[in-house]
Structures are given as structure tokens and as C-alpha cells.
Amino acid sequence: MECSRFVLVLALTLTAITPTLSTYHSATLLNVRHREKVTRLHFYLFDIISGTKPSAVEVARPKGTKYDKSATPFGSVWAIDDALREGPEFTSKVVGNAQGLYVSSVQDENSLGLVMYADFGFTTGKFNGSSFSVFSRNPIMEPGERELAVVGGRGRFRMAKGFVKVKTQFLNVTNGDAILEYRVTLVHY
């Protein structure tokens, strides 16, 4: 009895003094306001599903879509490494690539819509090594321009926010190949 009382008092004492002997370290930085910059970019994304070296490949397909003949059946997940080019021609200069995933999010077989999770990185010029990230719904079949959300960036686009205006230049509904015009407005530091 005496031993258990001693152990209980010792445990309570150690519990009580432990927080006072612990240290916590944090560095607080002053909130220095940087001047926001606005950058506008214009390029073309080549999303090629067909051929011997596609830039987008299906990595998952739900069971229920086994016999779905559309290029991107509902629920399918695609990994992308799409070229970003200066112009809409295959011979245009490559300025970077978009890497990420998209999920086919429309159940109607006669329509096409995606949710995109992609990082748009630049490999040449003033923004070499910088990228911005998009996480947004992309209703491919919507006529005219579509708008996507920019949710972040790195390098020269650190802390980026903004939007992308996307316009389909070419779409092969049989195999899913597409060339998309991107007009990007970024606000960053």
C-alpha cells in the first residue's frame, strides 16, 4: 500500500513538472507586405491520348464502365504530362508541361467533363523552373471559354492565385486528343 502510494505521488509530481521543463521553439516572422504582381500567360496545351507515345494515360477505370466506348468514361482517372507550346501547331516551341491528374466527372456518355489537378511548369524563358497549380472543374463540352481556378504556385509564381480561360482549339471526340488554348491571369508576389 505504502509503495503504491509512493508511485502515485511520484507519477503526479513528474506529470506536473514535465511541462515546466519542456521547451517550445517557434520563430515568428514579421508580416511584411510584398507588392502583388499580375502576370498574364498565353500558351497551348497538347493533351494527346492516342498514338504510341500519349501524354495522357488512363490509370484507373471503374468496374461499371467496362463496356463504355467513350474516350473518357465516367469515373476514369488519367495521369497527364502534357506539352505546353507557344502556338497551336505541333511544331510550335515547347515552353513547359502540365503534370497531374484528371477525373472524368460527367455520367452522360454524350458529354465530356473533367476535374483537373495539375501543375503547369515552365522549362524555358523568364519563368523557367516556376509553376502554378490548377484544381478545378473543366466542362469540356461547354461552348466558348471555360474558367478554371489557380490555387497556388512556386518559384516566380509563389503564393499565386488567379484564373485560367480555356478554349478548345481542337478536339477529336473519337480518341480524346485535344489542343487547348490557355489564357492565364496570375496574382502573385
Image: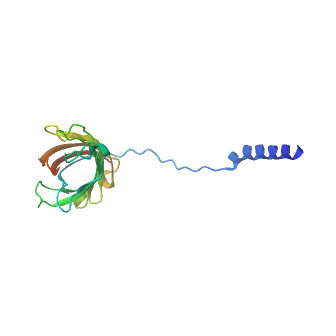
> Quadrant of the rendered structure where residue 12 is?
top right
Let me know if residue 33 appears in the view: yes
- Which image quarter is the N terminus in? top right
- Horizontally, residue 127 falls left or right of residue 29, namely left
* Front position in the image: 48 or 147: 48
Q: Please state the horizontal and vertical placement of residue 101, each as a whole percent of the image.
A: 30, 50
Task: Measuring from the top left, give residue 151's x and y in whole percent.
Answer: 32, 44
The residue lying at 14 percent from left, 48 percent from top is 174
Please name the residue shown 24% across and 57% down the image: 97
Way the structure is coloured: rainbow
Q: Tell me where residue 53 sits by quadrant.
A: bottom left
Q: Is residue 149 visible?
A: no
Q: Is residue 146 above or below residue 121?
A: above
Q: Which residue is depicted at the point 89% across and 44% down? A: 2
Q: Is residue 45 left or right of residue 25?
A: left
Identify the residue at the far right of this view: 2
Residue 24, image x, y percentages:
60, 49
Label count reads 0
Residue name at image x 20 percent, y 39 percent:
109
Question: Where is residue 73 drawn, in percent x and y?
Answer: 24, 44
In the image shown, does 179 or 84 lie closer to the viewer? 179
Q: Nearer the viewer, residue 94 or 172?
A: 172
State whether residue 136 is above or below residue 118: above
